[in-house]
Image (cartoon, rainbow, N blue to C red):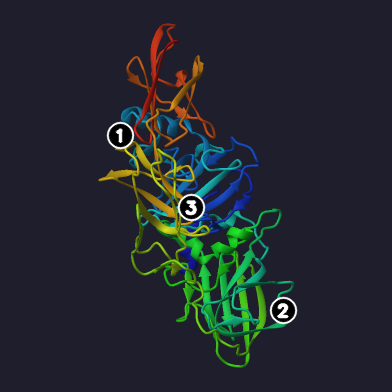
């Protein structure tokens, strides 16, 4: 019965392209600070490939310039899912017309347009867009996501398109990492993390361990006729024939995507650009794709005997590989003091509470749910001795330490300013917000290992006209708080200017506007506002 229902479900979906699917990336691949949320479908390295709706439904949303997706189309399906097509070059005429109606009705250039089921219905296989390279994309491709429409959890698109993807190659492990989890534990006589390669599926050498040890795995999946490597769908760790850990990357709540830094060893990735994914679960990691025994996957080597460990790797198609090795329990002298993972000279932040830390002129708040395990801060201050400096600089860790959810940092203003609303928190040149209250400016904080200070922006963005013909192109740049919004009008009536991807320019094709071509003169007004509400306006006369 279940197989019949699954067959019916899969039959209502079809490929988003009209050629054999080849993947550049799959669902759930670990990336810094996020999981890859969909499938990257290759487009032969070019833009302009036709993209089709994978099932019946309706266009529920179109976004322009949001979330790194570039141009994106959301299609809601009656089966309970919403498919999302990202990095698009352009939309089909019907979708573009609906988008323009929304933009002109709401007088907005950056769009998050929402539609009802009757506005733009689509059929399975209907043309919806041309592929592109917009947003946070480094090469032309289609990024396809699937979401549960009700919860907005990210789903694996492979599940709905598997019959159109050819894969007979099993995953492959490259190495494992041993991680003593407390000061009394050791592996091969060492107290710290160690990595070992997998030259074969069954290692002939024996390892020694004592105490509580967690393991992590460096592995990739592969497909024939492709040089790419992918994330592994399922990873199982067995000890003496008993399962202690099992990951199955089928559904990821979007609000938990930053927990990839907890499942993967982020510190190791930071230095080596390789992800070792933990086969144990840190106490604050609530990812539902991770399943472990009562010890959270940590193995207690407390007996002087051989422990037989086996990794089982499996992809969506069921291709499977096995890797095994033996660890011999052998006592090792325990140190007198210490606690692995929290050693240091600063205060300890705990994963299961809201944490605060303050110094003269600064206060840090890291809310509950922002850490997956306890961390010891290693704060630093750079005192600014310049006459008109707005604040000192503050850092809270000696290497990168991203949070799961945003924290807040408040910094005291050290010198008088003409307009307190122009103050903001900056981190390595990034605008981090700025709410002023009684001499303090509060901004958001995503990373404890960066430097934070106050900056002041009372300068409007610069505007430079590039072309004022039938296709108007205007560039704008703001070197301080950054551009927040832009708007334009012709003869006092709103007109859309689209951002030109991967540039500082904006374009308006007059042939696509409400303005008829009469050869008469018109007054163009183009305004740009930065994140501190400084506005620059450019006015000129055009003939069209």
Pointer 3 residue = 450
Q: Which residue is mark 2?
A: 203
Foreground residue among 18 and 369: 369
- Name the residue beneath numbered marker 1: 419
Q: Looking at the image, is mark 2 or mark 1 nearer the viewer?
A: 1
The answer for how far apart the CA atoms under marks 3 and 2 are is 41 Å
| Viewer-nearest of discs 1 and 3 | 1
Residue 470 versus residue 197 in the image, above or below:
above
Picture quadrant of residue 536 = top left
Q: Residue at x 57, y 77 (%)?
A: 237
Viewer-closest of 169 and 107: 107
Q: Earlier in the sequence, mark 3 or mark 2?
A: 2
Residue at x-position 74% and y-position 72%: 199
Q: Secondary structure at mark 3?
A: loop
Sequence-wise, which precedes: disc 1 or disc 3?
A: 1
Cα distance between the residues tagged 2 and 1: 67 Å
In-image side of 170 versus 105 (left or right): right
């Amino acid at each position: 019965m279940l197989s019949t229902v699954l067959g019916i479900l899969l039959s209502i979906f079809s490929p988003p392209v009209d050629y054999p699917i080849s993947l550049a990336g799959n669902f759930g691949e670990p990336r810094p600070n996020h999981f890859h949320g969909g499938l990257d479908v290759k487009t032969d390295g070019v833009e302009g490939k036709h993209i089709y709706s994978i099932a019946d439904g309706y266009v529920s949303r179109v976004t322009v310039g949001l979330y790194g997706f570039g141009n994106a189309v959301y299609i809601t399906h009656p089966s309970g899912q919403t498919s999302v097509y990202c990095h698009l070059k352009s939309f089909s005429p019907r979708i573009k017309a609906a988008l323009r109606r929304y933009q002109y009705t709401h007088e907005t250039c950056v769009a998050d347009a929402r539609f009802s089921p009757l506005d733009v219905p689509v059929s399975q296989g209907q043309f919806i867009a041309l592929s592109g390279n917009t947003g946070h994309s480094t090469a032309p491709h289609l990024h396809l996501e699937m979401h549960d429409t009700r919860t907005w959890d990210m789903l694996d698109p492979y599940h709905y398109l598997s019959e159109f993807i050819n894969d007979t190659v099993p995953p492959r492990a490259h190495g494992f990492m041993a991680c003593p989890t407390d000061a009394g534990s050791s592996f091969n006589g060492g107290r710290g993390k160690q990595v070992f390669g997998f030259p074969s599926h069954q290692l002939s050498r024996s390892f020694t361990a004592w105490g509580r040890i967690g393991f992590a795995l460096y592995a990739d999946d592969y497909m024939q006729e492709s040089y790419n490597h992918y994330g592994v769908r399922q990873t199982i760790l067995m000890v003496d024939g008993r399962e202690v850990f099992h990951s199955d990357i089928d559904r990821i709540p979007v609000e938990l995507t930053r927990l990839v830094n907890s499942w993967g060893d982020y510190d190791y990735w930071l230095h080596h650009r390789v992800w070792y994914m933990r086969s144990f679960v840190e106490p604050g990691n609530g990812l539902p794709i991770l399943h472990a025994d009562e010890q959270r996957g940590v193995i207690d080597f407390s007996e002087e005997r051989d422990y037989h460990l086996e990794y089982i790797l499996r992809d969506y198609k069921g291709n499977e590989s096995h890797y095994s090795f033996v660890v011999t329990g052998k006592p090792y002298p325990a140190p007198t003091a210490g606690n692995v993972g929290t050693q240091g000279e600063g205060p300890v932040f705990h994963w299961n509470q809201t944490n605060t830390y303050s110094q003269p002129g600064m206060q840090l708040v890291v809310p509950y749910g922002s850490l997956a395990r306890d961390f010891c801060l290693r704060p630093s201050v750079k005192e600014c001795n310049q006459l008109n400096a707005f604040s000192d600089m503050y850092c809270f860790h000696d290497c990168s330490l991203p949070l799961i959810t945003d924290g807040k940092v408040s910094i005291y203003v050290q010198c008088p300013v003409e307009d307190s609303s122009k103050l903001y928190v900056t981190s390595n040149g990034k605008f981090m917000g700025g709410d002023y209250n009684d001499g303090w400016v509060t901004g958001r904080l995503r990373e404890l290992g960066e430097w934070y200070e106050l900056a002041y922006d009372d300068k409007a963005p610069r505007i430079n006209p590039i072309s004022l013909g039938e296709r108007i192109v205007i560039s704008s740049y703001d070197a301080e708080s950054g551009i927040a919004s832009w708007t334009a009008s012709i003869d006092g009536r709103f007109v859309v200017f689209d951002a030109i991807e991967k540039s500082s320019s904006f374009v308006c094709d007059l042939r696509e506007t409400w303005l008829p071509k009469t050869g008469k003169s018109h007054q163009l007004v183009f305004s740009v506002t930065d994140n501190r509400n400084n506005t620059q306006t450019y006015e000129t006369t055009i003939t069209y």
